[in-house]
Amino acid sequence: MASVEKFEDLFCWVKARELTREIYTAFQQCHDRGFKDQIQRAAVSVISNIAEGFERGTRQEFINYLFIAKGSAGEVRAQLYVALDIHYINSETFKHLNELAIECSKLLMSFVNKVKGGSEQGLQFKKIAKPDPYMEFLKSDYPEIYQQLQEQHKPKPAI
């Protein structure tokens, strides 16, 4: 399995982005600034914590931020119940947004389990191969010998 190189490739992040966009759209005309701000910040917290955890570089921090994102998805769901109860949204909008938030929570939990079970510790623990000092010496002082050695060690094409 190929490793993910950027958080934008994570399906849970893509789904959190959709949730955030849908929350902003649904409450665009809401005049209750306090409520609108709260639910929008909770939605942004989901997407932001996935990204921040990914960029932290260690598995444990990533898992921690994924759980924070999951908590924010729960906060969005709680706010949706309030919005439904005080008639800021109708039941159809509630159902759609609630399903998105639940899907985000499920994806995050599934991803946490994958990350926990993975063998990689994180970028901060990644072993970086050190250059061979002898080869570096040849490369700088005897480039023709260095080039010959490089040619000898090229993989042969499969027939």
Image: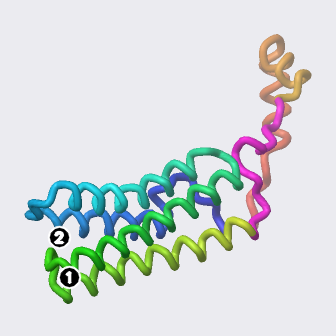
Q: Are marks 2 and 1 in contact (CB under 8 Å)?
A: yes
Residue 128 magenta-highlighted? yes
Amino acid type, callout 2 = Ala
Disc 1: CA contacts within 10 A as few (<14), some (14-19) or many (>=20)? some
Image quadrant in which the C terminus is located: bottom right
Stretch in magenta: 117-130
User: Label 2: which residue?
Assistant: 26
Give the side of residue 120 with respect to residue 2, left or right: right
Position of residue 136 measured from the top left corner of the image (x, y, whole percent)? 82, 21
Magenta stretch, overall SS: loop
Q: Report the residue at 40% width, 68% height from top.
A: 75
Toward which corner of the image does residue 66 lie, by quadrant?
Answer: bottom right
Distance Cα–Cα, label 2 vs label 1: 8 Å
Position of residue 116 measured from the top left corner of the image (x, y, whole percent)? 73, 67
Amino acid type, callout 1 = Thr
Q: Report the residue at 77% width, 44% height from top.
A: 126
Which of 74 and 2 lies nearest the eye of the viewer? Answer: 74
